[in-house]
Amino acid sequence: MKIFSVIGARPQFIKLAPIVRAFNQDEGRSGSGKIIHGIVHTGQHYDYLMNKVFFENLGLPEPDFNLEVGSASHAKQTGVMLELIEQVLENERPDWVLVYGDTNSTLAGALAAVKMGISVGHIEAGLRSFNRRMPEEINRILADRCAEALFCPTENACRILKNEGCPLIVNEGKLIKNIARSGIGGETRRPFAVNVGDVMYDASLMALKAGKRLSGILSSLGLKRGEYYLATIHRAENTDVRSRLEILIESLAELGRKAPVVFPVHPRTKQRLEQFHIKVPFSQGLKLCDPVGYTDMLILEESARCILTDSGGIQKEAFFFGIPCLTLRDETEWIETVASGDNVLTGISKESILTAALGISSKAKKGRIAGPFGDGKAAEKVKDVLVQLAG
Ligand code: UD1
Ligand code: UDP
C-alpha cells in the first residue's frame, strides 16, 4: 500500500513524526499490509526555525518532494500547491493521501487527491471553532468533506462530524473494514470517522524525554522552573488587526514588569509588528526571541508557570503537561481543555489577560496527561485502520 503525506507548516511536521514512526514499524512486512510512505512538503514554511529544525529534532526523513511554494496570498499559495501536488500524485499514484490539521497545505493536498480519485485521510478531523472568518475553519471543513477516512483526535470531534452528517462513526477500529465497505452495492466506501486520539500527544511523548536530556534552553535564557510565563501569538485574527496586536503586546509588556515572559515570535507576527510600526514597550521581564525548536519548546512549556497563546497545538500541550493556559482568543476548537478548567479564554482584553495571568500561582502545575486526547498510540491506530482497509 502506497501512502503519501502532504505537509508544509510547523505543526504538521510535528503531527507527521508519530505517523512516520508507526509506518516504519511495518518495515519488513510483506503483502498488502506493507506500507510505502512518501512525504510531500509544500514549502509553506521554509525558515530553518520554522522547518528544518523540526525534521532534526524529530528525526524525520528528508521529504521525497519539496514543492518550495513559499509565502503568498491564500488563493495564490493554495493554487500553486494544488498544481504541483497534482503533478506529484499523477506520477506517483498513491493509494492514500494523508493530510494534517487545517492549513492551506491541508486543503491543497486533500483537494488535489480527491479530484484524482485518490482516497484522502484527514488527521485531526472534526475540529471546529464555528468562526468562519478563520482561514483554518474553511480549510478544515473542506478537508473533512474531501476525506474518506476522518481520523478524529477526540470524541467531541467525532460528534461534530456526526452532527454534520458524516455517514459512519466507527468506535472500534476492527470493525472498520466491514462497515466501510457496506456502501452502495458494497463497491464504494462511505466516508467514516473514527476517534484514534491525538497524534500531537503521541509526538509530545516521543520528544519530551529527549528534550529533558538535551535542551539547555532554561539556563540559556536564565529561567527558573515555575517562575516565568511563556507566550506565543500568530493567529491572523490577532496579528492582522492592529488594535488587537497592540493590546496583546501591551499586555505581555505589563506582565513582564511583574515576572519574566518568554515570547518566541512567529514570522507573521514579526512582520506585522514591523508593518504596523508597533514598538514593544520597555519591560524588564519581556524577552522576545526567534521561534524555538520543538524540544526546546516542550521544555519551555513544561516548566512555565502559565502559557499565554493563540496556538491550537500549544493549548493542548499545556493540557498534556498540566500547565495552566490562557487562550488569547474569543473561542477555541479544543473545548475539552476549557471544560476541565485548565484553559481559560481571555479574549483580547488587557484587563482580563493580566487578571488571569497574575492570579496563577507558581505551584499551579497539575501534572496532568492526555485525558480526552487518547493513549499516545493515535498514529498506530491510523496505520491499523489503513492496513485493514487494504486487506
Ligand atoms: C499557517 C497556517 C496556520 C497555522 C500556522 C502554524 C494557513 C492559512 N495558516 O499560518 O493555520 O496555525 O501556519 O504556524 O495555512 N513566514 C516566514 N517564514 C516562514 C514561513 C512564513 O517569514 O518560514 C512569514 C511570511 O511573511 C508569510 C507569513 O509568515 O507571509 C505567514 O505565513 P503563512 O504560512 O501564510 O501563514 P502562517 O501565519 O504561518
Ligand atoms: N512550537 C515550537 N516552537 C515555537 C512555537 C511553537 O516548536 O517557537 C510548536 C509547539 O510546541 C506546537 C506547534 O509548534 O507543537 C504549534 O504550532 P503553531 O503554534 O505554529 O500552530 P497551530 O498549532 O496553532 O496550528
Image: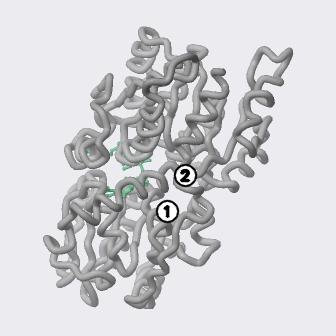
| Residue 287 locus on image (x, y percent) | 20, 73
| Residue neighbourhood size for the residue with mark 2, other residues' Cα within 10 Å, grouped as few (<14), some (14–19), many (≥20) | many
- Work out whether 241 lies above or below 344: above
Q: Residue at x 20, y 67 (%)?
A: 217
- Left or right relative to 97: residue 225: left
* Residue that extends furthest to the top in the rendered view of this protein: 91
Q: Is residue 218 visible?
A: yes
Q: In the rendering, which numbered label is found on residue 334?
A: none
Q: Between residue 248 and residue 385, name the one nearer to us.
A: 385
Q: State yes or no: discs 2 and 1 in contact (Cβ < 8 Å).
A: yes
* Residue that extends furthest to the right in the rendered view of this protein: 185
| Residue neighbourhood size for the residue with mark 1, other residues' Cα within 10 Å, grouped as few (<14), some (14–19), many (≥20) | many
Residue type, mark 2 in image = Asp
Q: Residue at x 69, y 54 (%)?
A: 155
Can you identify the residue that label 2 sits on?
198
- Left or right relative to 248: residue 2: right
